[in-house]
Amino acid sequence: MIGASRALLVKKYSLHINCGGSKTTIGNTTYESDEVLGGATKFYWTNNKYWGFSSTGGFWDHNRTNDDYMAKNLTVLSMDNSELYMTARLSPLSLTYYGRCLANGSYTVKLHFAEIIFRDDKNFSSLGRRIFDVYIQENLVLKDFNIENVSGGVDKEVIREFRAVVRDKTLEIRFQWVGKGTTCVPSRGNYGPLISAISMKSGKLFV
């Protein structure tokens, strides 16, 4: 407990997460591992307490397991920094990431997406449509976001950059399904939000 308390006193100025994947270094930036399994109701803090996530919503199919809250691409990706897009975390309803112990100030937030579940090969799985909203610090920043449409296809990355203000040492990013998109293709429950990687980096700090 003493070690955890001391960790919470340390101010962080950046945070990078490889959602659903292992620890990965891109250039001079190391993205932390995010491989803990999800669930219909899940709340998790990392051992260092600097970040965590919560997930809500159960898949409709009875044969789905906690592994299904993690997406893994089995194909070869051609984009730069493909290590960030081989995995993703998803939820049928709501997925929220929390950055803690951040120095108060303005931050650049980068959200990395790639649609790695739906396909574009004209079979049944190509009919899926994933549409969700994104909130940062409770402010709606992406409405009816469709990764496949914005990136121009499946297995293609799209990065969205935003500014956010931290006033209480915490930065919250929420991905929310709002009832749009397909609900049974290619299997029941693949319609919810999906995120490949998250980056938070401080800019102007508050005194």
Image (spheres, rainbow, N blue to C red):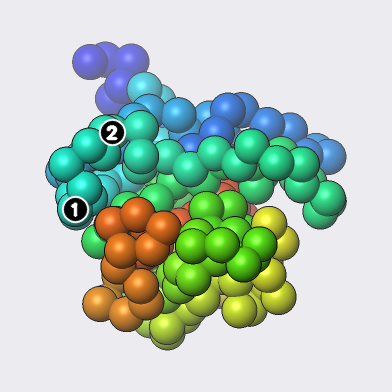
Residue shown at the point (55%, 34%) measured from the top left? 21
Can residue 71 be seen here? yes
State the SS at label 1: loop
Q: Is residue 186 above or below residue 34?
A: below
* Residue 33: % across, % down: 53, 30
User: Quick check: 25 left or right of 21?
Assistant: right
Closer to us: 55 or 119: 119
Q: CA distance from mark 1 to mark 2?
A: 13 Å
What residue is shown at x 50% (from left), y 60% (from top)? Answer: 125
Q: Residue at x 68, y 70 (%)?
A: 153
Q: Which residue is mark 2?
A: 66
Circle 1 crowding by C-alpha within 10 Å: few under 14, some 14–19, many from 20:
some
Which residue position holds label 1?
60
Left of 44 or right of it: where is 101? Answer: right
* Comes first in the chain, label 1 or label 2: 1
* 117 with respect to 73 (left or right): left
* Quadrant assignment, res 83: top right
Mark 2 surroundings: few (<14), some (14-19) or many (≥20) residues within 10 A = few
91 relative to 158 in the view: left or right: left
Image x and y of residue 92, in percent: 28, 57
Q: Is residue 188 above or below residue 176?
A: above
> Residue 97 location, x and y as percent?
37, 51
Evaluate if marks 1 and 2 touch, with contact meaning CB atoms under 8 Å apart: no
Between residues 128 and 206, which one lies in front from this camera angle? Answer: 128
Give above or below for 59 relative to 125: above
| Amino acid at circle 2 | Asn
Q: How many marks?
A: 2
Q: Is residue 104 visible?
A: no
Residue at the spot x=46%, y=68% of the render?
A: 128
Query: Among all residues in the image, which is located at the extreme front?
Result: 123
Residue 39 location in percent, x, y?
A: 23, 38
